[in-house]
Amino acid sequence: MLAGSIVAKGQIELIEAPEPELVTPPPGEPGDIIFQPHHACLCGSDLPFFCGPQESYPLQIGLSLHEMVGTVVETSGSKFKKGDQVLAVPVQQVGFFERFRVSEARAIPRDPRKPPEVAMLAQPLGTVIYGLKKVPTYLDQDVAVVGQGPIGQMFCAALRNLGARRIIAIDPLASRLAMSPRMGATHVIDSSVQDPREEVARITERASVDIVIEAVGHENQALDLCTDLCRHKGTILFFGVPNEVIDGIQWRKLFMKNLTVRTTVNPDFERDFPLAMQWISEDRIDLSPLLTHHFPVGQIQEAFEMFRDKTEGCLKVHLTFPD
């Protein structure tokens, strides 16, 4: 069967890998499923593996893919049966296989009311919902979302549902900001030509916002900007996966402003992903515009390059596996 292998910085290949096998779970533990993905999406957290450099190559086979929906081929548990359509999340993003074994506890049913590639977006949306739950309320709050990649766009859409007064989208790419109002932003700031601090002051008439969401991650250090934009005793929700060490942080400024910094990782399979699937299936939120580019998995190199380079207005890169 096919599997993905990152063999050098910026280079991924399809290779042959052995078929997965079920094992009998220990007493009282959830069973496993053999999962066959049909649709997948690239995520910003996949890029550090692809972009490198890493200590040695090739990387572990199966890195890196984790947003996917497909079919239960076999099961050793009781949660699903053969042929069920599910959203499954592999451990540590090691999911770039034509089939792989994963705990049934890391899968939820796919709602059939939406096309599978749209239902698949419940995975990233679930991570957004989990993060949003860290802050008590967004109703009547001014919120800045730093970073307008797919996750930043999802934050804008969710904040609109949650009653934020102003949703200020900030990004250096005009192509991404063009999507932001459609997803819920009330204001956009192109940080390549505008100073976000000056623009936020102009928009809010008080120089700061109540909540800042960091949706940039490892690419650039944005915590200092978040600190500058956040009001005294405000909150920063740090979503973007950071590097191991971030240099040059204005920690004293953050400290003196009495800011609350909340981090968010590892959503709940019992609450967050099912709620995201419910939002999508009940048309509470429309994320389909984020699916901007589509590739068969055989063109995975081109797909990763487009996602890395953010060309052609790229947001979500959708992959299809062979039947």
Image (cartoon, grey):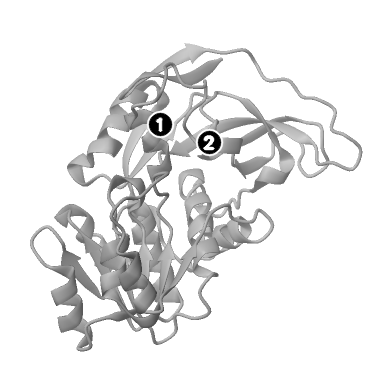
Q: Where is residue 252 drawn, in percent x and y?
A: 33, 69
User: For residue 93, which numbered disc appears in the image?
Assistant: 2
Q: Which residue occupies the foreground of this view, 249 or 118?
A: 249
Amino acid carrying mark 1 in the image: Phe
- Other-residue count near label 2 (Cα within 10 Å), few / some / many at <14 / 14–19 / ≥20: some
Q: Is residue 184 visible?
A: no
Residue 157 marker: none
User: Is 22 left, or right, of 273 in this rendering?
Assistant: right
Q: Looking at the rendering, which quadrant does residue 155 occupy?
A: bottom left
Task: Determine whether, in the image, residue 270 is placed left or right of residue 12.
Answer: right
287 or 153, which is in the foreground? 153
Which residue extends farthest right? 27
- Taking depth in this image into account, of 134 and 247 the one nearest to the observer is 247
- For image coordinates 71% across by 38% down, the residue present is 103
- Which one is in front, 93 or 41? 93
Pinpoint residue 229: horizontal percent, then vertical percent: 27, 74
Give me the residue at 11% from left, 57% from top.
192
User: Image point 44% across, 84% down: which residue?
Assistant: 139
Q: Position of residue 2 (x, y in %)?
A: 51, 17
Residue 186, how many percent across, how many down?
26, 76
Q: Label for residue 49?
A: 1
Is 158 rendered above or below residue 292?
below
Foreground: disc 1 or disc 2: 1
Label 1 close to label 2 by CB (< 8 Å): yes
Disc 2 element: helix
Relative horizontal placement of residue 55, taking residue 222 as reference (left or right): right
Q: Secondary structure at mark 1?
A: helix
